[in-house]
Amino acid sequence: MKIIIAAFLLLLCFMAKAESISSPSGNITLEFSINERGIPTYQVTYKGIPVIKPSTLGIELNEENSLMDSFRINNTSTSTFDETWEPVWGENSHIRNRYNELFVELEKPSNGRFMNLRFRVYDDGVGFRYEFPSQQYLPYFVVKKEHTQFAMTGDHTAWWIPGDYDTQEYDYTESKLSEIRSLLSGAVDGNLSQSIFSSTGVQTSLQMKTAEGLYINLHEAALVDYSCMHLVLDDKNFVFTSQLTPDAQGNMAYMQTPCRTPWRTVMVSDDARDILASNLILNLNEPCKYKDTSWIKPVKYIGVWWEMIAGGKPWAYTWDVPSVRLGETDYNKVKPNGQHPANNENVKKYIDFAAKHGFDQVLVEGWNIGWEDWFGHSKDYVFDFVTPYPDFDIKMLNEYAQSKGVKLMMHHETSASIRNYERHMEAAYQLMNDYGYNAVKSGYVGNMIPRGEHHYGQWLNNHYLYAVTEAAKHHIMVNAHEAVRPTGLCRTYPNLIGNESARGTEYEAFSGNKPFHTTVLPFTRLQGGPMDYTPGIFEMDMSKLNPNSKSHVNSTLARQLALYVTMYSPLQMAADIPENYERFMDAFQFIKDVPVDWDESKYLEAEPGRYIVVARKAKGSNNWFIGCTSGEEGHLSTLKLDFLDNDKKYIATVYEDGKDAHYRNNPQSYGIRKGIVTAKSVLKMKAVAGGGYAISIIEITDKTVLRGLKNLK
């Protein structure tokens, strides 16, 4: 009898009363409980509608005593938080961080181990994480698998890319959840490093839409000292389970208490614009770690890059050296190939163009020795990041640039040899200081060294952050390509000014991007931070740059302008070559005018995979800029400009698709018109298939400019 009573009491402990907490507005409610097996469980509703059905939580350890079940609740507590903070740069000059929190303290009586769960419920979504206090019976542990579930309520429409431990550079697929399995193999195309892990695996940020019109987004925030999370779908029950990136031994993370995981996030709204405007990911990150941020500045740049990517020119200096040994190979004794773009004369041309048109910096790739055998050989000592080729006078070019008010942007391609980069990092950053560089584009192309590690595992994630924090000691901003996708760490470390971590413009010169690509990325990849997408391509026919290429940019010229507004980044490149801009200087004016830092952003119209229209107010001014990107169907807009100041007049310059424009057969057809607008103005706009429009709205301070201008409609 005593045994029965004890078992009953233990069951009562496990079946503890559910705890509920709602967002400040009351629209989102999270309910937590532990089930009859002592497994932590949560569910989420939006305006009373189920969003996440009961879903279990747990951590499987690389030992017997996993943190999966048989928990009891020792204590729960709630709190509220409300602050407004100012980012160093961003879409808005002020961000409100307001949430209600539920903190659950769990114990596993069988082994005396403790695990806590922290839930924060915002008006735009939910964030939760696992926390492990300092404890006697769990000082260290190895994560074998994280069992975080997201149980969907039905067969939602999703915009997804295949789950991969080494690349995010895939085109998006739009499908029902039930179709992912049949479509996944066809969604995988070639990359220089890839590791597909499941026939139903997808990556976050994952955007979905329910049949009832709810928009749901799954992601993570504050990815620090842990492995990147992907999702595997049980497509019979529509339940996603977390899938962490393993290390070379197959383990997911090595932990020492006290410690915590990144946040797991669920955004939800019945308005797609709310997903784009959400600051949930940023708010779940820690405040800025730097006392002085005056050296961190948004950047608009051009670069010696597209003529290699699209034009087929080499990064390498010579064809004579099939095997480079740094410190031994004498480049002064080899024959130059005569095609190397990172040469003094060509770089000076870019510097002159940047100075003439008001660009901040010039990126130069292929400036340093070692490109002759940089890829495909699993080479450890591949670059030294300090020694230029003979045709690149680093001192002269930096002095020339600075004399014209321009900086050069450094390029550090690591060829995924991480030990080599870290052994040279201090000298490389010091060289930048010596010559006045303040920004670096780093790259991680290829399979990782240490061999067997993946791009998104705990070891590499720690490296990426190490590179950023070491750069900060030298007042250097970092734009990392092929690194792990952002999770809002730019709030904490704002010198992380950009990332690639998705399929960018460079693929337009290869196999192309789907026309709807830029209507999806702001819902997915950009949720965690800005992307160095490299827009601004004016010549869509790649054979004009490289006769051997048959590639085509799937965009109109007008949409390329719009991307400077719709694809938010404090780091924006005018990616085409100067000669192509000189052919369309009237359109190029918008790229010259558009800022890269903002006081306010308003998402006017949005539907994933179809269209996005956003208006942004330039930092420290009353000027606004609007951009629209559309998919295959095009888009008609009725824009109310009621966000303008009521007592002011503005000159609006509209850059729009021509009536006969089409992304495939007539992409360079565009029109420009100008007129007067006020807060009462309503503009009728049309974007064609794969097209868009861009509008600059400049406050009138000199009434003489009104002569000859009419009200714009």
Image (cartoon, rainbow, N blue to C red):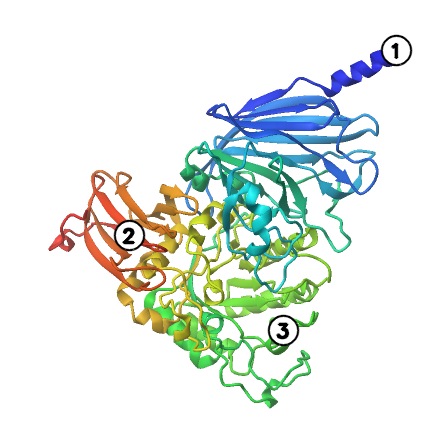
What residue is rendered at 54% in x and 37% in y? 155
Q: Earlier in the sequence, mark 3 or mark 2?
A: 3
Q: Is residue 204 visible?
A: no
Amino acid on which disc 2 is placed? Ile
Q: Label 3 vs label 1: CA separation?
A: 72 Å
Image quarter for residue 331?
bottom right
Of the numbered discs in the image, which one, if any, rests on residue 695?
2
Query: With respect to residue 135, does 656 lie above or below?
Result: below
Q: Residue 153 or 691: which is nearer the viewer?
A: 153
Disc 3 or 1, which lies upstream in sequence? Answer: 1
User: Tag 1's secondary structure?
Assistant: helix
Which quadrant holds residue 277? Answer: top left
Q: Position of residue 94 (x, y in %)?
A: 43, 40
Q: Amino acid at mark 1?
A: Lys
Q: Is residue 613 left or right of residue 640?
A: right
**Residue designated by label 1:** 2
Pointer 3: residues within 10 angstroms few (<14), some, or many (20+)? many
| Disc 2 element | strand
